[in-house]
Image (cartoon, grey):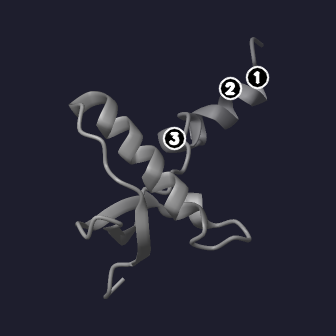
């Protein structure tokens, strides 16, 4: 008897149970409006919500957006000025 009872049990399980499951991901994000010191406005800047789950709340959003700005500057050659204020986009 090769496998015996174990083979019978596996055949009776639905295929979904036997297949590997994908890891759950949180693809939700929070939108922020950013005003730079030169007066320019950048609306609806996306930050993944998992980045904001720590004890600092929205605090990390500023340095995350600054990191996005540095990456964009590297690719485009256009440097953004310092951030003056940052707030969640209304209606979130």
Q: Position of residue 37 (x, y in %)?
A: 35, 66
Asked whether the residues under the numbered discs 1 and 2 touch, taking CB atoms below 8 Å apart as contact, a structural biologist would say yes
| Residue indicated by mark 2 | 7
Residue drawn 75% across the image and 11% down it: 2
From where the camera sits, is residue 28 visible? no
Measured in 3D between alpha carbons, the distance from the residue under mark 3 to the one under mark 2, in whole angstroms, is: 25 Å
Task: Name the one closer to the observer, 39 or 88.
Answer: 39
Is 41 left, or right, of 86 in this rendering?
left
Q: Residues within 10 Å of mark 3 (few under 14, many from 20)?
A: few
User: Which residue is disc 1 drawn over?
Assistant: 4
**SS for tag 3?**
loop
Q: Position of residue 6 (x, y in %)?
A: 75, 28
Q: Left or right of 85: which side holds 59?
A: right
> From what the image shows, is residue 79 above or below residue 54?
above
Which residue is pictured at 51% across the width and 62% down the height?
62
Q: Nearer the viewer, mark 3 or mark 1?
A: 3
Is residue 86 depicted above or below 90 in this figure? above
> Which one is earlier in the sequence, the residue at label 3 or at label 2?
2
Identity of the residue furthest to the front in this view? 38
Contact (Cβ within 8 Å) of mark 3 with mark 1: no
Residue 33 in the image: state x and y as whole percent: 33, 72
Local crowd size for mark 2, using a 10 Å CA cut-off: few (<14), some (14–19), many (≥20): few
Give the image quarter of residue 12. top right
| Residue 73 visible | yes
Spot occupied by residue 53 in the image (x, y as percentages of width and height): 64, 67
């Amino acid at each position: 008897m090769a496998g015996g009872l174990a083979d019978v049990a596996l055949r009776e399980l639905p295929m979904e149970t036997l297949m590997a499951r994908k890891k759950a991901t949180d693809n939700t994000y929070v939108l922020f409006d950013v005003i730079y010191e030169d007066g320019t406005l950048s609306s609806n800047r996306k930050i993944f919500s998992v980045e904001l789950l720590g004890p600092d709340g929205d605090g990390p959003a500023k340095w995350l957006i600054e990191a996005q700005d540095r990456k964009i500057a590297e690719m485009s050659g256009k440097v953004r000025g310092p951030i003056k204020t940052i707030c969640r986009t209304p209606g979130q």
